[in-house]
Image: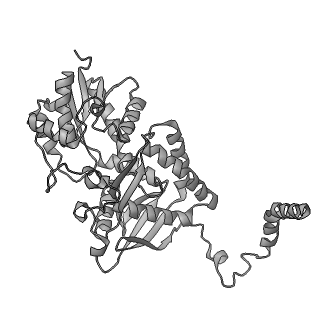
């Protein structure tokens, strides 16, 4: 007899979580609450409700929550204030969604009196870590059920066979047969794993990509866009103010039609293995480029360099699931403090996979002084003679060392 009476399942309605729902009912003999998060994945989510009803889930225990605004405002934008990139390339589209899903799942567990939560992350991946670190940070004594660490359905084909034998609808089969790509989508990105991508020497199929055209097929004329920032966050496109989730969606459309934001990456997973994934992050790619451009005229040099130094640590914390950890919160406070003067606009040119900064300015917070930076007559604003003592002082230790080497012969 199971000691679990009620469990909240992070439920997409897809193959994996539909199998998990049935497996939880059969294995744990418990009541299941389904939670489906709308993070802007661009798919109809109501079918998840009808599928849950088919499994006998009570209507009041089916949660389908629109979290798009909270996701972008409270998770994506704070991450981009740090110019966050993992291992030099990855914009963390999957990673940043997990702490919000965990947060809402725990809230539902408290609302419904559930003592357990469950997720569909495999035992090989990073998401199991991200979800569960979030669960424990927010509800320390919660019971976590991770089916991929308990059952023997350890392949796509076994999942498909289980689904067929239990009458579970199967969707998104690859047109040539076999299992579909393992995909994750939200307002920031869409990712693809599995199938022939497991061979790092194989080129991704052009038909796989959903959000972006290939750079070769992008328009032959560039498109210009102006992005305005307030305290480090984008607030308008070409003068039109938008809510955060609307703005990111608009940037996705802009970038997608110009072939911006594709990435083919072999990354180092938390559990120790290397894994290949393909990603589309058109809006995030534009946003990152624009944010660095407005910071270039509004941030003090040493503050900017400090941000660049802590960013890899901040990125690793998010990638590894430590969004709710005290060190991430401390770094966020530092990063947010630096953004108080990051106000202004950036003009960009989008062309065949490229995001090109063409101009930037800040009416109130620019540190760029043309009277000092000019190559023309600066009317005494900058005294070149000041550099003499500065250079000699900075060279002093090297001069002493050189003299010592000369004495030694």
Question: Relative to 398, is 172 above or below?
Answer: above
Horizontally, residue 372 falls left or right of residue 60, namely right
**Furthest residue in direction right, as rendered:** 407
Left or right: where does residue 303 sit relative to residue 94?
Answer: right
Q: Quadrant of residue 405?
A: bottom right
State the residue in front, 332 or 141.
141
Would residue 42 appear left or right of 334 to someone viewing this image? Answer: left
Q: Is residue 143 above or below residue 310?
A: above
Q: Nearer the viewer, residue 372 or 401?
A: 401
- Residue 222 is situated, as x and y percent measured from the top left of the image, at 34, 78
The furthest residue to the top: 1
If the image is split into quadrants, where does the C terminus sit?
bottom right
- Residue 140, quarter of the rendered image: top left
Which one is nearer the viewer's eye here, 309 or 363?
309
What sort of colour scheme is used for the picture?
one colour
- Horizontal side of residue 331 vs 378, given as left or right: left
Q: Name the residue furthest bottom.
A: 376
Residue 195 locus on image (x, y percent):
25, 52
Tell me the residue at 21%/38% (across/down): 17
- Indicate the position of residue 244 as horizontal and vertical percent values: 35, 55
Q: Nearer the viewer, residue 5 or 46?
A: 5
Residue 376, quarter of picture: bottom right
Tell me if residue 255 can be seen.
yes
Which x, y percent locates residue 77?
A: 41, 52
Q: Residue at x 48, y 49 (%)?
A: 315
Q: In this rendering, is residue 135 above or below 234?
A: above
């Amino acid at each position: 007899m199971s000691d679990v009476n009620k469990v909240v399942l992070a439920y997409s309605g897809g193959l994996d979580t539909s199998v998990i729902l049935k497996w939880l009912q059969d294995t744990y003999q418990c009541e299941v609450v389904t939670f489906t998060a709308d993070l802007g994945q661009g798919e109809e989510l109501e079918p998840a409700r009808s599928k849950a009803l088919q499994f006998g889930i009570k209507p009041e225990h089916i949660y389908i929550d629109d979290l798009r605004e909270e996701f972008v405002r409270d998770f994506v934008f704070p991450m981009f204030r740090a110019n966050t990139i993992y291992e030099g390339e990855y914009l963390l589209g999957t990673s940043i969604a997990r702490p919000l899903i965990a947060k809402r799942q725990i809230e539902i567990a408290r609302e419904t009196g559930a003592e357990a939560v469950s997720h569909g992350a495999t035992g090989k991946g990073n998401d199991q870590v991200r979800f569960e670190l979030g669960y424990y940070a927010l509800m320390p004594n919660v019971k976590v059920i991770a089916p991929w660490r308990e059952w023997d359905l350890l392949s796509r084909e076994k999942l498909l066979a289980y689904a067929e034998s239990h009458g579970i609808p199967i969707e998104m089969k690859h047109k040539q047969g076999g299992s579909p790509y393992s995909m994750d989508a939200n307002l920031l990105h869409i990712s693809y794993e599995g199938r022939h991508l497991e061979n790092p020497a194989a080129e991704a199929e052009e038909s796989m990509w959903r959000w972006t055209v290939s750079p070769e097929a992008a328009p032959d004329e560039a498109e210009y866009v102006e992005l305005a920032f307030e305290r480090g966050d984008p607030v308008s496109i070409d003068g039109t103010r938008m809510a955060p989730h609307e703005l990111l969606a608009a940037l996705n459309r802009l970038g997608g039609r110009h072939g911006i934001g594709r990435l083919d990456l072999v990354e180092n997973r938390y559990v120790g293995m290397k894994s290949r994934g393909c990603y589309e992050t058109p809006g995030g790619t534009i946003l990152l480029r624009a944010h660095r451009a407005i910071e270039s005229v509004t941030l003090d040099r040493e503050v900017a360099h400090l941000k660049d130094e802590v960013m890899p640590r901040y990125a690793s914390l998010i990638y590894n699931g430590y969004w709710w950890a005290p060190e991430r919160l401390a770094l966020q406070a530092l990063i947010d403090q630096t953004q108080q003067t990051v106000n202004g606009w950036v003009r960009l040119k989008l062309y065949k996979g490229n995001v090109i900064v063409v101009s930037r300015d800040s009416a109130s917070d620019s540190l760029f002084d043309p009277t000092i930076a000019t190559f023309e007559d600066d009317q005494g604003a900058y005294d070149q003679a000041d550099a003499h003592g500065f250079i000699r002082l900075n060279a002093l230790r090297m001069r002493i060392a050189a003299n010592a080497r000369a004495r030694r012969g």
